[in-house]
Image (cartoon, rainbow, N blue to C red):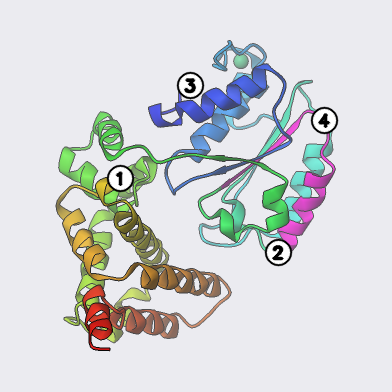
């Protein structure tokens, strides 16, 4: 079991802590969607539960624990995810998880749990978890993963040791995707649509989501330039793929902000040029404000807000985003 090259530094840090018995009771792995937080978390689980891992933390692959892990039946490993993607993690499963963590381990080693994505926990669930974080049992490790740690309860966040998993360089990511069988152009495009997370890019590619996201990006661009009616786009978007489109929109905003803050880090490739044009024309502060608005809308959506209204509001505001040029003109005319 290996991690991808860009996860290696974070893994080395964790493995050193494991060898020196300095692992905390709770870890928060943060980083972009598809950067490999799960992979890293699972690697820790294997190193902690295998009966004879080597110095590098590689599991032996032959002991009973390794067999149970491969079969997904290890009694000392618990995993908590939303029942459905995009839905909340509720309090009852969190309570069961906490009880499970408190029970003595079967293998006489660690008890480990992964909660992902941690920000999916609703407020009751997060409060319930907090008790376990405040009074941890020996030899337990709770691993939270989150691409949006800002949406976690601050009290939960502060009780975890946070490890930020950085995105690989574009070249590193494309090399990795090429090794998974993607042609250069498909790799570049899917990476861009995924917001830079290679594992998510691979998922998007395999699920054939590129065409849909590419269309969405083009529509956003057209709405931004006044070539397309925001209300038309709103009615088209409210179908099944809404969550995917909104996630995409969020990632593109982050790319735009990053492209403005660090132009040297900007993106290469066909589709990237479209984003680049947007990045040059839209004002950075407006992008931040819009990102907040988009996050609120996504949260509200989970609680049953009217999709059509929410989309119309977002897209009309998107169409009215002040561009740098307008802003300069306005300032110049004062
Ligand atoms: Zn083993």
Q: Is residue 162 above or below residue 23?
A: below
Q: Is residue 86 above or below residue 270?
A: below
The kind of secondary structure element at disc 2 is: helix
State yes or no: discs 1 and 4 in contact (Cβ < 8 Å). no
State yes or no: discs 4 and 3 in contact (Cβ < 8 Å). no
Q: Is residue 130 magenta?
A: yes
Single out the residue that lies furthest toward the bottom. 334
Q: Residues within 10 Å of mark 4 (few under 14, many from 20)?
A: few
Span shown in magenta: 123-145
Q: Quadrant of ligand 1?
A: top right
Q: Which circle, 3 or 1, is nearer the viewer? A: 3
Q: Is residue 294 above or below residue 134?
A: below
Q: Residues within 10 Å of mark 2 (few under 14, many from 20)?
A: some
Q: Which residue is mark 4?
A: 138
Structural distance between the alpha carbons of marks 3 and 1: 22 Å
Badge count: 4
Of marks 2 and 1, which one's residue comes earlier in the chain? 2
Q: Which residue is mark 2?
A: 123
Q: Which circle, 4 or 3, is nearer the viewer? A: 4
Residue 190 visible? The answer is no
Structural distance between the alpha carbons of marks 1 and 4: 41 Å
Structural distance between the alpha carbons of marks 2 and 4: 26 Å
Question: On residue 321, which mark appears?
Answer: none
Q: Residues within 10 Å of mark 3 (few under 14, many from 20)?
A: few
Question: On residue 1, which mark appears?
Answer: 3
Of marks 3 and 1, which one's residue comes earlier in the chain? 3
Of marks 4 and 3, which one's residue comes earlier in the chain? 3
As rendered, which of 82 and 54 lies closer to the eye? 54
């Amino acid at each position: 079991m290996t991690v991808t090259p860009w996860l290696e530094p974070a893994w080395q840090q964790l493995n050193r802590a494991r060898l020196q018995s300095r692992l905390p009771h709770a870890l928060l792995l943060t980083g972009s969607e598809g950067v490999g937080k799960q992979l890293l978390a699972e690697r820790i689980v294997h190193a902690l539960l295998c009966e004879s891992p080597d110095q590098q933390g590689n599991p032996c692959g032959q002991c009973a624990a390794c067999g149970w892990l491969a079969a997904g039946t290890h009694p000392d490993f618990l995993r908590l995810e939303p029942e459905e993607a995009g839905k909340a993690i509720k309090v009852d499963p969190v309570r069961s998880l906490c009880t499970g963590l408190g029970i003595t381990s079967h293998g006489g080693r660690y008890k480990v749990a992964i909660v992902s994505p941690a920000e999916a926990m609703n407020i009751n669930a997060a409060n319930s978890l907090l008790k376990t974080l405040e009074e941890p049992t020996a030899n337990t490790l709770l691993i939270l993963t989150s691409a949006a740690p800002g949406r976690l309860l601050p009290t939960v966040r502060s009780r975890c040791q946070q490890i930020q998993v950085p995105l690989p360089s574009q070249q590193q990511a494309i090399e990795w995707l090429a090794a998974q069988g993607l042609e250069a152009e498909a790799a570049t495009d899917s990476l861009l649509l995924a917001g830079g997370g290679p594992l998510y890019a691979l998922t998007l590619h395999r699920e054939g989501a590129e065409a849909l996201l590419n269309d969405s990006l083009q529509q956003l661009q057209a709405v931004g330039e006044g070539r397309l009616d925001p209300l038309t786009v709103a009615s088209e978007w409210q179908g099944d793929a809404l969550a995917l489109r909104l996630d995409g929109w969020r990632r593109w905003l982050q790319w735009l902000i990053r492209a403005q803050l660090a132009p040297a880090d900007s993106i290469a490739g066909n589709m990237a040029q479209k984003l680049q044009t947007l990045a040059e024309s839209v004002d950075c502060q407006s992008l931040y404000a819009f990102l907040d608005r988009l996050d609120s809308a996504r949260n509200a959506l989970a609680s049953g807000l009217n999709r059509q209204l929410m989309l119309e509001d977002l897209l009309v505001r998107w169409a009215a985003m002040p561009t740098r040029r307008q802003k300069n003109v306005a300032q110049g005319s004062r």
